[in-house]
């Protein structure tokens, strides 16, 4: 047997972990601003204020907008997902143990990526709660609550440019499917229906998707309607995998790891929808 067989094993395993993470690891990372190849323990996201246009006299000086610039610092955290692969596991089972463990590690790190983004969303302060029926903490996801969040983003001048997202729990997703405007092709068009290949769809100018990891505070699930630029995600290290042979265990130890972080960049671009779960 070739002395380099372990290297082939390691390279194949690393490729499978990376592929699994890209395929099904994180649902929310494509929905936010993302920086890669960050150097250091933190990075900075720029936040630019609103400009105001003004007139000028003939031959006068062009007025300056005096944009307010500020920064938000995102700290990175290191995360690991490791396990053992016994040398003879493949002989004793009818499954590919390496692929199973590669998927498990990639999914675990993908869930951690989403946890970081959700934690950043949880720091937002805008709430879609009002005195009108359907906008209180005593009900689930309603048409009125979704429309209030939509209205709030519009009033805050959050761009309606195709980069808005809404993430809800699975209970709220089921409730949305009972709303005609959400689920009926007569309202949203056949191409926008939620059951074509994946549970995600376009409604109110945003991409809606269900997620199992949203914060549950007592009986209230925290759902969000937000713009992509309102949340920042940074990665100093994408997923890397270290595979080492331990002769005393007759097994490989596989450690997948990453260094990432997330932060709320602009509080104005996020609206929380609190929904009661029974």
Image (spheres, rainbow, N blue to C red):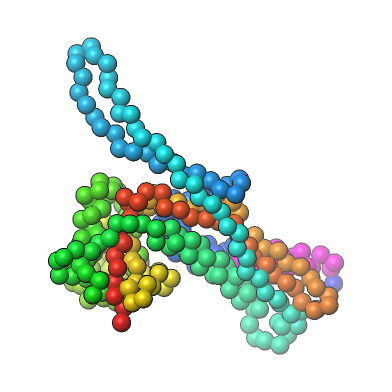
Taking 126 as reference, is 181 above or below it? below
Whole-percent x and y of residue 161? 29, 48
Which residue: 57% across, 64% down? 19
For residue 171, which quarter of the picture? bottom left
Which residue: 36% across, 57% down? 124
Whole-percent x and y of residue 66? 33, 29
Which residue: 26% across, 74% down? 140
Decide if residue 171 is on the left or right side of residue 38.
left
Whole-percent x and y of residue 200? 35, 67
Residue 97, magenta (yes or no): no
For residue 10, which quarter of the picture? bottom right
Taking 7 as reference, is 67 above or below it? above
* Quadrant showing the C terminus: bottom left
Whole-percent x and y of residue 43? 53, 46
- Magenta-tinted stretch: 2-17
Decide if residue 249 is on the left or right side of residue 215.
right
Front one among 158 and 203: 158
Res 191 visible = no
């Amino acid at each position: 047997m070739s002395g380099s067989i372990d290297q082939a094993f390691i390279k194949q395993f690393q490729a499978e972990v990376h592929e699994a993470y890209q395929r099904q690891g994180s649902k929310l990372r494509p929905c936010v601003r993302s920086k890669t190849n960050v150097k250091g323990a933190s990075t900075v996201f720029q936040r630019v204020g609103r400009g105001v246009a003004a007139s000028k006299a003939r031959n006068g000086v062009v007025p300056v907008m005096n944009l307010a610039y500020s920064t938000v610092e995102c700290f990175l955290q290191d995360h690991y997902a490791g396990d053992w692969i016994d040398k003879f596991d493949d002989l004793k089972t009818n499954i590919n143990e390496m692929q199973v463990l590669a998927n498990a590690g990639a999914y675990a790190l993908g869930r951690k990526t989403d946890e970081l983004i959700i934690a950043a969303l949880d720091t937002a302060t805008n709430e879609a709660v009002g005195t009108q029926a359907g906008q209180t903490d005593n009900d689930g996801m309603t048409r009125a609550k979704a429309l209030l969040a939509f209205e709030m983003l519009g009033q805050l001048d959050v761009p309606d440019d195709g980069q808005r997202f809404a993430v809800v729990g699975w209970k709220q997703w089921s409730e949305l499917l009972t709303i005609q405007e959400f689920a009926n092709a007569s309202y949203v068009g056949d191409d926008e229906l939620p059951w074509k290949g994946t549970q995600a769809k376009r409604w109110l100018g945003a991409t809606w998707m269900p997620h199992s990891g949203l914060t549950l505070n007592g009986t209230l699930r925290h759902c969000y309607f937000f713009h992509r630029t309102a949340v920042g995600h940074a990665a100093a290290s994408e997923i890397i995998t270290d595979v080492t042979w331990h002769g005393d265990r007759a097994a490989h130890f596989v450690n997948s790891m990453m260094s990432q972080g997330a932060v709320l960049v602009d509080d104005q671009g996020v609206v929380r929808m609190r929904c009661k779960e029974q």
